[in-house]
Amino acid sequence: MRFFVTYDADRTSGLAAFLHFLYENGFDTYFSEKSFDDKETNICVVLMCRQPDLNFKQRIRLSAKDNTLYIDLMLDLRVVVLMSDMEKRSFVVRKMLEELPPIIAKYERLNFDVLRFSQDLRLWFERHGVVSDDFEN
């Protein structure tokens, strides 16, 4: 499976450091060795970090052409810019762990093993020091 994370945000958001952390530590490689359904569905997460008054809407779509589920995770730029890199990392990881599984589960026709995906996602973040045992599910 290809699990790709990118962002659409002002440079001041500091999300580039989060992406650097992911890819420097082999996030893409870890998930490339996994499969959660028989269709080899890919996931692309866009960290959409904008000011809420701009009224950006969350986009979620399944592309049959490239067999990819595209998901925007909405982040408030005014909040994110005030966070340290570690706070941003924890905040974005929490959003990913909380919001991605229910969104993926809505696509029943994918027959996607959402529970195993959630566990593997959490495990990767645990192994890289972002999630601890006391981190809420």
Image: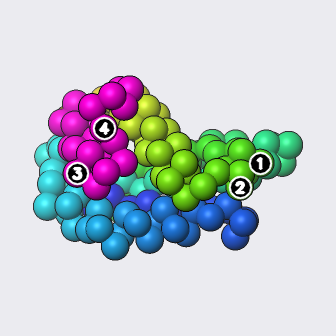
Quarter holding residue 134:
top left
Q: Nearer the viewer, mark 4 or mark 2?
A: 4
Segment colored magenta: 114-137
Q: Residues within 10 Å of mark 2 (few under 14, many from 20)?
A: some
Upstream in sequence: badge 3 or badge 2: 2
Is 117 part of what is drawn in magenta? yes
**Spatial separation of the CA atoms under disc 4 and disc 1:** 27 Å
Three-letter code for the amino acid on which mark 1 is drawn: Arg
Q: Determine contact: label 2, label 1, CB under 8 Å.
A: yes
Q: Position of residue 96 (x, y in %)?
A: 44, 42
- Tag 2's secondary structure? loop
Q: Position of residue 111 (x, y in %)?
A: 22, 34
**Which residue in the structure is indicated by mark 2?**
81
**Which residue in the structure is indicated by mark 3?**
127
- Tag 4's secondary structure? loop
Q: Nearer the viewer, residue 130 or 45?
A: 130
Upstream in sequence: badge 4 or badge 2: 2
Image mark for residue 78? 1
Three-letter code for the amino acid on which mark 3 is drawn: Arg
Q: Quadrant of the N terminus?
A: bottom left
- Tag 1's secondary structure? helix
Q: Residues within 10 Å of mark 3 (few under 14, many from 20)?
A: few
Q: Residue at x 20, y 61 (%)?
A: 30
Image mark for residue 132? 4
Image mark for residue 111? none
Q: Residue furthest right?
A: 53
Upstream in sequence: badge 4 or badge 1: 1
**Spatial separation of the CA atoms under disc 2 and disc 1:** 6 Å
